[in-house]
Image: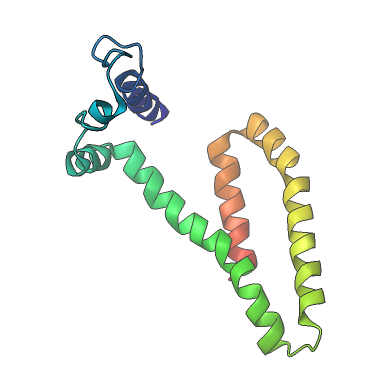
Amino acid sequence: TIRGTIATSAEITVEFQPNAPHAPSPSTNSANQADTPHAPLIPAIRRLFRNGPYVRYLLFRIPMTLAALLPSSLLPDFIKYVMQLEDWSLTLNLGLGITILSIFVSIPLLISLSRRYGKREVLTVACIIDGVVFC
């Protein structure tokens, strides 16, 4: 899970350290540094998708991100066309302000709940509540 991601980022960090033994000396010009080979894109992507925990994370994270972005993206259209308000920008700004305020208020609550009950349980309950509210 996280160890695989940390290990991969550690490999990348080690690959690109300027003082590493395989790095070109500082006396070489920048044109030669642009010609240094990097890991090919396709094998790197294949290796990424062979990491099972990361693929599960992506399968969970992508729909969750879309679900979080949809209400705020569709709010202007809802206010303007469904509610048919003349001054829809004031209502939109008020709704977005309340949303941002509730996000900042909920962060300490979610942190304390995750320390008490565990991240997995709190995330599961938060996703269920989010699904019920926005369905």
- Image point (26%, 32%), residue name: 34
Find residue 7 and report its image quarter: top left
Residue 133 in the image, given as x and y percentages of width and height: 65, 66
Instruction: Tell me: 92 left or right of 28.
Output: right
- Image point (78%, 88%), residue name: 85
20 to 58, vertically: above or below: above
- Image point (56%, 67%), residue name: 70
Instruction: Tell me: 131 left or right of 55.
Output: right
Instruction: Tell me: 1 left or right of 50.
Output: right
- Residue furthest to the top in view is 21
Find residue 47 and report its image quarter: top left
The one of 88 and 14 positioned closer to us in this rendering: 14
Residue 17 in the image, given as x and y percentages of width and height: 36, 18
Which quadrant of the rendered structure holds the N terminus? Answer: top left
Residue 89 in the image, given as x and y percentages of width and height: 77, 77
**Image mark count:** 0
